Image: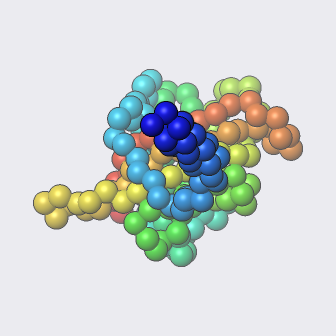
Amino acid sequence: MKNAFKVTFAFLIALSILNACKKKTGNPMDFTIDAQNLTPCTEGNCLFEYVNYAATTDQQMALTIGQQRIFLTTKSNNFSTTRVSIQAPMQGDKFLLTDDDILAGKVKYLFSCASCDYFNLIPIAGKVKGIKVTSINSSAEKWLLDAHIVLAAEKSKKPVDTIHIKQYFNLAVK
């Protein structure tokens, strides 16, 4: 009886070790976003909206007709405006942008202030997850985004700031 217990115990330990060492090869698109700890709007006015079939044309984030879904975050106060644009595909009910997408220019950052002494920051890394929220009572669709964007000075790869955005985005009113 003692030997059967030892063999069974050894087998369970070996099985546990093998299972723990197994690489996780899950689909990166298998994610959810909870609605806890949403980004608050402090010290000014905030706008979280998106536009379908759009594209950004320049660093100022002017919109034109395109093939992407553009998510815009704008925070403004009495002296400055900060904007972040996120370019996502039109197809699907969720999307994931990684470091490579951010380096390819799918995330843009703009801080404008007429009387501030600052240097231009650009996104260099991070992750942006977005998921379409099921509409209730036939209201317009909305999206929940969770973004962590690392910023560096222009022509530098040294991180100087990180932006965290977790918020619902509504379809922009034209």
The residue at the far front in this view is 1
Which colour scheme appears in the figure? rainbow
Q: Position of residue 103 (x, y in %)?
A: 74, 55
How many marks are shown on the rendered structure? 0
Residue 108 versus residue 87 in the image, above or below: above
**33 displayed left or right of 80:** left
Task: Please name whichever residue, 51 or 107, is drawn nearer the observer in this view of the structure.
Answer: 107
Task: Please name whichever residue, 34 or 12, is drawn nearer the observer in this view of the structure.
Answer: 12
Residue depicted at 70% across the width and 46% down the height: 125
Q: Position of residue 49 (x, y in %)?
A: 41, 52
Q: Position of residue 75 (x, y in %)?
A: 49, 37
Residue 124 versus residue 161 in the image, above or below: below
Residue depicted at 60% across the width and 59% down the height: 25
Residue 54 visible in the current orientation: no
Q: Position of residue 112 (x, y in %)?
A: 63, 38
Residue depicted at 67% across the width and 27% down the height: 115
Quadrant containing the C terminus is bottom left
Residue 34 visible in the current orientation: yes
Residue 55 versus residue 99 in the image, above or below: below
Task: Please name whichever residue, 107 or 98, is drawn nearer the observer in this view of the structure.
Answer: 98
Residue depicted at 83% across the width and 40% down the height: 157
The residue at the far left in this view is 137
Quadrant containing the N terminus is top left
**154 displayed left or right of 40:** right
